[in-house]
Amino acid sequence: MMSLQRYAVFLLLGATALVPTTQVSLQDTTVIDGLIETQADGHEHPEVELSATLTRILDSPAIDETRRQALKLFHGQWDDFTAETPDEEAALAWASYRLSDPSTFEASSDLTLRAEVALFRGDAGEVLRLLQDEVTVAAAFLRGRALEDLGRLSEAVALLTPLRERFQHETLTDPAELTAGANAIVLLAHLEGRPSQDYELALGMYARAYQELDPLYWPARVAEAQLLMSKDNWSEASDALQEALSFNPKAGIAWYELGRLWVDSYNFDAAAEVSDQLRTINPIHPLADVIDIRSFLRQCDVASARKVLVPALKSFPKNRELLALAAATEAMAYDDSALASALDRFDQISTGGREDAVGSPLALYIAGEYMSLDRQYIPAEDLLRRAIERSPNWPAPRLELGLLLMQSGDLKSARLELAHAQRLDPFHQRINNQLRLVEDLLDEYETIETENFVIRYRPGIDEVLARDMPGPLEELYDELTAVFQHRPANKTQIDLMPDQSTFAVRITGMPDIWTIAAATGDVISMTPPRSGPDQFDPYNWVNVMRHEFVHTVNLAQTQNRVPHWFTEACAVSSETTGRTFDSCQLLAWAVHNDKLFEYDQINWGFVRPKTDRERPLAYAQSDWMLEFIAIHWSHQAVVDLLDLYREGVSDTDALKQVTGYTADAFMDAFSVWAEGQVQAWGLGRVETSEEAAAVLASGGQGIATSQLVELLEAHGNNHPDLLKLVAERAADGVDPEQTRLWLNRYAQARPVDPWPHKVLTQLAFDLGRPEEALGSLQLLERSDTYTSTWSHQLAEIHRSAGRLDAAQRSITRALYCEPYHAPYRELAATIAIQRRDLETAAFQVEALAILEPDRAQHPTRLAVIYSRLNRPDDAHDAAQRALELNPNAKVQNFLKAEPTE
């Protein structure tokens, strides 16, 4: 019969929190899609296919029933399994985490199994007592784990060091012992901060266990996955977990680690599916509780985390991970007294009452990690530094501290911590990514400093955008700090990343997130608004920066305690583009279909959307709710709410204090107002005859224009959808006056739709009367943050009409969207020269010289402009550069005479 000791040793890092993995990337979820099958109902269900090799062995007539019974137990095939011995009862209870089962306490049960159970429960002293006379490698590893949990680190090192020396000349032939030996190597490396060869050694031992000794030995694959996760190599870790589950679909520890990956990737629905899967093994599975708690804390849902945590701790009051999560929960609740008590409780248990024990850093680390995620940087830094003090050789808190310092803008300190972490763990992907970036930011990037900002950029083409930034940034600073009545204490750092991958490393440590910009407090990182591989494409960077800077202001003025929906509302409301037609349509749909978020649910639309519509709806509705507050209670109410958040007043309590409304009463009033708004947009419900409904459904096919007009008249000449059909027909016709008439009528009926203005603009150009397009172009310009077309057309119209100041404003706005577009720079320089603004002309030609460094005409023109500005040294340098590019350049008049000897 298979050794039950061999079965028991599979409980490794994650379940008892030896070395918790650090936060992984936010978006790279494809690597574990093999374990997720999307069903017709739209939900994700974990699916695992049992190994064909294992199936053949289990079905083989060549094995006897005793062997088959042992295989079924070990590989989670329990549907027709009945425990026949006390040892089997204990092993089955442990495998399903039924840890109150009497069999796990029986003195006759396997000692190693009983020690595993005791370790999970947090009874580290009991582990030492049970295994004091055991000489197996597995027993040594478990004793080392227990000593670590008790904070007796030097004893743990002394116990495990001989094992490492032993493995250098002894070859283990039992896969369980070999796996336990690799676990011991990993633990010793963690305690000592061993160099990289221990990582390779452990991986080799795991591979030998399941490749050479026993291909069915799934615990080695789980252990390998945990080691890979500790290096943030979660693609390979996921593969290993999938293989492990194919050999045991009920391996709780494998599901647990998979759930951790989903939580750390912010895929909370998938994490919940894994939690559900664990509960099919055991309805009160403690690992499912841990996944749920971590998921809720990552979503800043302290109340839900506490509901799961309290009963879990009642069942396992000494479990180290649950105790550490209890500290994190109190930290996330901003309860300093309760946090101190939770940390004290953890220390009392982790030291076993011994004054010479240093105590485990786990609770400090986990509390610090979650506080950092919540952007509570000052208390998080304190917790993480205390964790490092307790365990200087553990890279995880150093990495988290380095990320925190990066996000808060202290790059020099971040480099020190990350460099130390890399020395401890040179194979960790996130450490390496982040250290490379911080070194680049400090050593390679250039900076431009203004009164309130520090702008960093990589030398090269991005200098063009960086040079544009100071003026608009200082303007938006003055405006937005006045609006929200708060000035951040520190200068805001703007990190202009050269591409999307580098941007992702800047904000998450891994190169796989796709968005435009992000504020993490005093630091705003952004991607450049340009086209090309690994780029986002053009966008109005000033508009985006307004959004992100509002986050910086709100976070500072509330000590990072502002509700998610409220700071997004403040940020969206501060954008210059206004509400888009897409947003209006989405809001109208939500109103008509009773899909507006309830007050207590809107935050989940940002972090846990259930459909593709929910996240954009959360942004749009938040902005709408803020508009409602400002209209009915004044803008000062917005500032008052921010002040209350800073004091720690809850979202709903602050709302009641400022508006006098409960959350439900507020939403009732808001919904009534929202109906009126939708009606004013021309998106409200309109009484429509059956005939009209059929015509609209067909797009008016086969219906004469005159019939459409009659149908419109039958609906009071005020049916927006019918009006649009008639306007579309008119736009396809040959009578421009009729076209203009119907387009304007539709625009009045549905003022939020940009379509008639696009057609009116084209019509004006086609008729050679571009001045008639001014109104429409101005509206289009205000409503579009992703194109420069409208601003460029405005600039050309104004320039042709001699309105040069207006032309300069319009081309400047075009450059907000496409600062790397050389023709726009050419036009901006031309307009500046026409305005006799030579400083601006020089600025634009300097940008052209950066964008097109091989064209001699740019330094040639600069030489002329500098000369007229009475800047002879600059004119001389520009002339020399022109001659380097074109020896025939006509710049001799601008060269200064060389000094004679």
Image: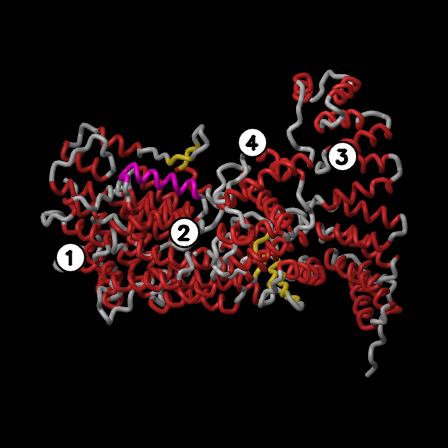
Q: Is residue 629 above or below residue 47?
A: below
User: Which residue position is annotated with label 4?
Assistant: 593
> As shown in the figure, which amino acid type bears the numbered disc 4?
Asn
Number of numbered discs visible in the structure rendering:
4
Mark-to-mark CA distance, 1 and 2? 39 Å
Dot 3 and dot 2 residues touching (CB under 8 Å): no
**Disc sitting over residue 518 in the figure:** none
- In the rendered image, residue 850 lying in the magenta stretch gets the answer no
Can you see residue 466? no
Give residue 770's quadrant in the image.
Answer: top right
From this viewpoint, which residue is outermost toward the front? 660
Dot 1 and dot 2 residues touching (CB under 8 Å): no
Mark-to-mark CA distance, 3 and 1? 82 Å
From this viewpoint, which residue is outermost toward the left? 108
User: Which residue position is annotated with label 2?
Assistant: 302
Give residue 149's quadrant in the image.
Answer: bottom left
> As shown in the figure, which amino acid type bears the numbered disc 3?
Ala
Mark-to-mark CA distance, 1 and 4? 64 Å
The secondary element bearing badge 2 is classed as helix
Q: Earlier in the sequence, mark 3 or mark 1?
A: 1
Dot 3 and dot 4 residues touching (CB under 8 Å): no
Specify start and end residues of the magenta stretch as a single range. 268-283
Residue at 22% x, 64% y is 352
Where is the C terminus found, in terms of image quarters? bottom right
The secondary element bearing badge 3 is classed as helix
Can you see residue 760? yes
Residue at 27% x, 65% y is 151
User: Which residue position is annotated with label 1?
Assistant: 131
Front-most of residues 503 and 186: 503
> As shown in the figure, which amino acid type bears the numbered disc 2?
Val
Mark 3 or mark 1: which is in front? 3
